[in-house]
Amino acid sequence: MGEHRRRSAQTTGKLFFLSVVQTEVPPLFVVEFLHRVADTFQDYFGECSETVIKDNVVIVYELLEEMLDNGFPLATESNVLMEMIRPPTILRSVVNTLTGGSNVGEKLPTGQLSIIPWRRAGVKYTNNEAYFDVIEEIDAIVDKSGTTVFAEIQGVVEACVKLSGMPDLTLSFMNPRLLDDVSFHPCVRFKRWEADRVLSFIPPDGNFRLMSYHVSSQNLVAIPVYVKQNISFLETGSCGRLEITIGPKQTMGKTVEALMVTIHMPKSVLSVNLTATQGSYTYDLTTKALIWTIGKLNPQKLPNLRGSLSMQSGVPKPEENPSINLDLKIQQLAISGLKVSRLDMYGEKYKPFKGVKYLTKAGKFQVRT
Amino acid sequence: MTDSKYFTTTKKGEIFELKAELNSDKKEKKKEAVKKVIASMTVGKDVSALFPDVVNCMQTDNLELKKLVYLYLMNYAKSQPDMAIMAVNTFVKDCEDPNPLIRALAVRTMGCIRVDKITEYLCEPLRKCLKDEDPYVRKTAAVCVAKLHDINAQLVEDQGFLDTLKDLISDSNPMVVANAVAALSEIAESHPNSNLMDLNPQTINKLLTALNECTEWGQIFILDCLANYTPRDDRESQSICERVTPRLSHANSAVVLSAVKVLMKFMEMLPKDLDYYGTLLKKLAPPLVTLLSAEPELQYVALRNINLIVQRRPEILKHEMKVFFVKYNDPIYVKLEKLDIMIRLASQANIAQVLAELKEYATEVDVDFVRKAVRAIGRCAIKVEQSAERCVSTLLDLIQTKVNYVVQEAIVVIKDIFRKYPNKYESVIATLCENLDSLDEPEARAAMIWIVGEYAERIDNADELLESFLEGFHDESTQVQLQLLTAIVKLFLKKPTETQELVQQVLSLATQDSDNPDLRDRGYIYWRLLSTDPVAAKEVVLAEKPLISEETDLIEPTLLEELICHIGTLASVYHKPPSAFVEGSRGVQHKRLPGSAGSGESVESPDTSSAAGISDAPPAVIPSQGDLLGDLLNLDVTPPATTGPPPAANSGVQMGAMDLLGGGLDSLMGAGFGAAPAAMPASFSAPVSGGLDDLFDLGGGVGMPMGAFSPPKTVWLPAMKGKGLEISGTFARRAGVFQMELTLMNKAMSVMTDFAIQFNRNSFGIAPAGPLQVLTPLSPNQTIEVTLPLNTVGPVMKMDPLNNLQVAVKNNIDVFYFSCQYPISMLFVEDGKMERQVFLATWKDIPNDNESQFQIKDCHLSSDAASNKLQGSNIFTIAKRTVDGQDMLYQSMKLTNGIWVLAELRLQAGNPNYTVSIKSSVVQPNL
């Protein structure tokens, strides 16, 4: 037997997942699988925590049994698993207690071996609906002078499809060429994308991530806000000054919401005494994190935070400059300009209800000082 | 009510109560009881006493209950083997259940019960399940074969399960194919030399078809399996690449990385001028970039792999510099890795950007990161000459910040910049001197002292500066002491008048008051040099220094090649070959990149070496040319197959695969003077030397056997790659002892100790018979000759070329890897003389297919002289015949692994060309 090695993946800072391997296995394989396990627990129990796992230990066992056999992943598609092991609901546990039924499906899931393992057969809905959320995150580094050092967009298309039967969908974009790199759910026919730049697929039932993409060409990445900042530590004495103003830059006429600023102060900053024209701020003494929650950005009255920082005396001026981290949201806008043009359905007769939502968020958005 | 209640029953008599519940008539109660048992098992309580009761619950039509019982069985069967037998009947029955789910469950569980008695019963049901009509059962059964093989390999082979498994590769269901591949790969891993995964174009085609349709995990198995295949030509390689590229868009990062591995490997085969080659390069970049937006742990794995990829093919990511820019909230391990890649990608085109970033990083919070960033600026200066000026000014700016550790790092790198660009930036010395007092780390102090000594003539108060260091001489680290000694001697040689006192002081400190032998020795040498011949001292101490090389931390090319074959695995994360960290036989297979298409041209890509500064092309290896017999006898068929004496491992010239006898006889019989044998490509005639000169000893005429031929020493590990350690060596067979003769030379500044050597598994099981005998530390510029006796009882693995030997040498500084090739003649043993009768019979027995002929040209020896000469190398003449003025010598030799080789050497008086026919009966040696 080979040496035992362990790898762990951390989720939400509460639980560590550990897997023991005996042979040389691709680490990403293990990490991806552990992520999938955590996601499955999340799907089944709504959260993934110690209590939940203890509360559902039998289902957890059954799930792990179904997901892995001798180190080979078996069924990791949530749809398939749900057919084999039914998620716990209050109603079901009552029924089970009364009838002696079980949580385990007695039949082989239809999806398990078909070439569309992600979809079960015989899906039926009274309201047939398909929703798509285009969510984009801006990762950016902006330097002191406001120049963008680096910016890219990580986008995902999340889908919630509740359609009866075996629908075959085609989703087309107005401007598919701006996507640099795409990764698809296995259901997407890659050849169609290569040839026509449309997403053609038989969807899984329920919620799934249809596609994730990446826009890195600098000129396409709009930076929605600008930050005017001045953080200085005086050479003598034990204080510093801070002033931050945020204003809209390229927002495409939409409102910037849920604006929040986080600054990790140098260790020697003991406390802060600031005034915010909008929103409120907190300063955590242990983590030295200054968090300013602003909310909606009003272009007429720009939010401003200013005041003094009191420093530990007798300690030299901090050498590093704190970076400013931004959080924000813009509803109904995909900042890359990506737009869904149409969704067509083949293979089924009914008329589905369709909807698309857009959302832009700040990902790792930081301003250097 | 939740399951957590199962954990809470801790009262006494619990087992007893459970027993009662398990035997209850009510189904529901039974199930609850089993659940409680499972919960107790989870928290580590011993519930094995309940074994019979739990097993009794097995016969049920409630699937959930059955599953739970099976779970219990897997856990406790080992401790209760006799009881486990009780369960066998139910298993066998379940394997025939009409519900495929139950059949699969049964066969799956049986495979997990590691009890010998049970495995015997498992065979029949397993055989049935492997041919089950339901693909779900088949795919489960495929995995079961791997499990069974782990328990009892012999049984699996005897029962013919391996063949059935191979058949499953052609199954109509892609999941079954994927699982069969996974199972076969796992079995093959424990038998590295078995020919299990017999990959041929047909199976490859099947795998590629299944690839599109199976689950993501199956795709990983299939891709990893594909990566072991060597395509026949560039066209096949291209078509595989084309079918693999869609996997780059998969959402699962492990699939992406496995696809990258396949593409990186097969790309080697594609001609560079092919349009498709360019397309492929472009397609590889975006997925690698996307991996960097994942969670930090995935990012780290991706970055470690990208680090390998940019060393091999920097052109893939040369435009993607920006994605490696560090975000301040990246974890430190991601930051450091990104920084490393940034430097590897730095070029004239993007250096401005890179420098601006690095300067930014130098003001960050994290000390380790800041240090590395400052060092990176220095590396940029050394790598991109045009940027040197800007780098130096950036470093000076950083020194102005007066941040202690920044200043120290900056001084260390400025020293390197001085070495790389002498007489260019010395104007900054004044600024450096201002910071002398703030240096408290040995490395920085040593660097500064070196600078002062080197440029003593330009620094007015050099003597004062050095004197100030001298005060605390004994408290300094060795590094600083040595530098100080040298620097003061330099100063004295430059300004003899004012510094006589100083030099005497330091010499006496070094020689009289120090217990460090290095320091003392160096002190004495200087002292004697100075007192006997100051002119000579000047020549020695102030000698011109060689320029430092561009990049110092590149991975050694052969190792890099191996690691490229392991992209996505742990090896690629550790940057170590799997043999370095996997124990036992599992997975210690050395993998090589396939050679480039076409002739035996070197695989060096011009852009690789220019952009990354890799000075030598990695010595790639031509794909295996068939079985050993092919190698053994096919002396003339494959054009680049025969070469001269073993090339130096680092020569960077693709020498082609060396065949067993091709290599051996060529260096033995020689082909070296001008007229190379017909088979030898013209390009090889130059390096071919030695050969007959050595062996036939032309000068001495017909001499007595002088012992076995031994090729001259060649450099195996150049000092540049060995961090100053240069190893040259050769192989010899002296008095029947096979040995490796090494010359170790220390070209570094520091003393080397703790030498050790290790060989990788190789074709003939060559292994060191004792430790490497380097008893005294190796001082700078010292050379030592070492003889390492070898034996052939080590582990065996077929290498390509056959006589390749991968060696690891360790010293106190690092572990270095190189590979070398031994002449096959070293393996001819002394008792290789066959009985005449036996010879005759054997010669007749060997079919003509196993015979190969080739010519040795321009050889002027009589048959007796040749025979004598060859005997020295353990090639024995059995008989001699003269027919029509032709001398025929019949010879035999025996390899250490017992393989006999027979030869007929035909000489014609007056004709300098000899004809050799070689035969061996071993078609498929059991390597």
Image: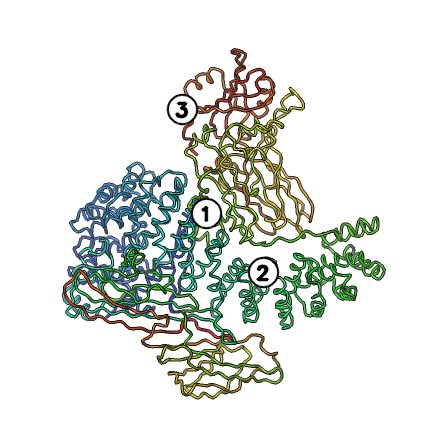
Q: Nearer the viewer, mark 3 or mark 2?
A: 2
Q: Position of residue A49 (x, y in %)?
A: 34, 69
Q: Residue at label 3? A: B849
Count of marks placed on residues: 3
Q: Tell me if B861 is positioned left or right of B446 in this view.
A: left
Q: Tell me if B823 is positioned left or right of B515 in this view.
A: left
Disc 2 packing (10 Å; few <14; some 14–19; many ≥20): many
Image quadrant assignment for residue B2: bottom left
Name the kind of residue labelled 2 in the image: Cys
Q: Residue A350's mark?
A: none
Considering the numbered disc 1 on the image, is that residue within a helix, a strand or a loop?
Answer: loop
- Give the answer, above or below, for where A123 lies relative to B194: below
Q: Residue at label 2? A: B380
Q: Residue B272's mark?
A: 1
Name the kind of residue labelled 1 in the image: Lys
Q: Nearer the viewer, mark 1 or mark 2?
A: 1
* Tag 1–tag 2 contact (CB < 8 Å): no
Q: Position of residue B914 (x, y in %)?
A: 54, 21
Q: Position of residue A245 (x, y in %)?
A: 47, 83
Q: Nearer the viewer, residue A283 or A147?
A: A147
Considering the numbered disc 3 on the image, is that residue within a helix, a strand or a loop?
Answer: helix
Q: Nearer the viewer, residue B802 or B740?
A: B802
Residue A275 visible here: yes
Q: Nearer the viewer, mark 1 or mark 3?
A: 1
Disc 1 packing (10 Å; few <14; some 14–19; many ≥20): some
Colouring method of the image: rainbow
